[in-house]
Image (tube, grey):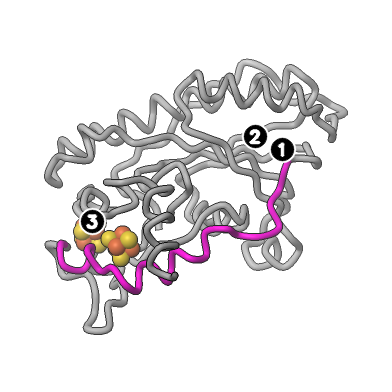
Amino acid sequence: MRFRYHQPIPNFYEIENPHHPKTTISDDFLKEFRDIAIASRFAGLSYAKLDDEFKKEWKIDWDNIIILKYAMSEEILRRDPSKEKCRLMDEEFQEVGAKTFALADILRENGFMADLINPLDDRVSLRAIALQSNDAVITRSNMCLFKEGLNLGFFMIETSIENLPFKDENELEWVRDYCSTCGVCIDRCPENAFDDDGKFLRKLCTAHREGCSVCINFCPFYKRGYDKVKKRYSRMKK
Ligand code: SF4
Ligand code: SF4
């Protein structure tokens, strides 16, 4: 399900894909690319290798995905749900989206195939791709959590680069157990978008329609950050 208030992003490519794309990136150039991304607004990068089963399920033929994560503005997240909040969230989305095209152009210019995945395409779930990175989990409040934070939006680039630093194991699996002990989002949700067992009820959540972010603002992963919550969890388990 996508955020209904986002508008399509115009095509900002300035460079064509190479005819014979390279498939191997050097560590130095990948680091340079990451540094440029972070300097231009992004909080971090993750990488997903899509296996045959996943590609068959979603009817796609992509292999290698670069996930560019950006932190949504705290000032906007603090606002109550409203049309104006949705407009501001879309404005930020458009601004960051334009930067993603520029990053894809850098890859193209250096001989790699790089295409922005349409973030508004209902045929494929970017969140499902994010989980393939082994660098994210879905929290109890149905948010996609990466180590960089809970308030992340993301764009994705499909690329010919085959030697990205893909992760085999997900270090964030513990978050599900932590969520089972927390439940702050359930207590704070103004829409009661959870059933009696604490299971998230998607149809009642207004995040995608009206820009609700109440549970983000109260979640320990947002208020304290991933590392502090992890430390607390480790102490709880001793
Ligand atoms: S508020 Fe608590 S239960 Fe809800 S997502 Fe955050 S950590 Fe998990
Ligand atoms: S309605 Fe708001 S507080 Fe409730 S789950 Fe959705 S985003 Fe979170």
Asked if residue 177 is among those painted magenta in the image, a careful observer would answer yes
The residue carrying mark 3 has its beta carbon less than 8 Å from ligand 2: yes
Q: Which residue is mark 1?
A: 159
In the depicted structure, whether residue 119 falls above or below residue 94: below
Would residue 206 be seen by someone viewing this image from the given angle?
no
Question: Which mark identifies residue 115?
Answer: 2
The stretch in magenta equals 165-188
Residue 227 in the image, given as x and y percentages of width and height: 43, 48
Residue 22 in the image, given as x and y percentages of width and height: 85, 30
Task: Locate ligand 1 by image quadrant.
Answer: bottom left
Mark 2: secondary structure: strand
Q: Amino acid at mark 1?
A: Thr
Residue 42 in the image, given as x and y percentages of width and height: 48, 29
Which quadrant of the rendered structure holds the C terminus?
bottom left
Q: CA distance from mark 2 to mark 3?
A: 33 Å
Horizontal side of 164 relative to 223 (left or right) equals right
Asked if residue 135 is among those painted magenta in the image, a careful observer would answer no
- For mark 2, does the 10 Å Cα neighbourhood hold few (<14), some (14 to 19), or many (20 or more) residues? many
Residue at horizontal 22%, vertical 83%? 196
Mark 3: secondary structure: helix
Would residue 2 be seen by someone viewing this image from the given angle?
yes
- N-terminal-most mark, 2 or 3: 2
Foreground tag (1 vs 3): 3
Q: Amino acid at mark 3?
A: Cys
- N-terminal-most mark, 1 or 2: 2
Residue at horizontal 68%, vertical 52%? 167
Residue 163 in the image, given as x and y percentages of width and height: 80, 40
- N-terminal-most mark, 1 or 3: 1
Q: Which residue is mark 3?
A: 215
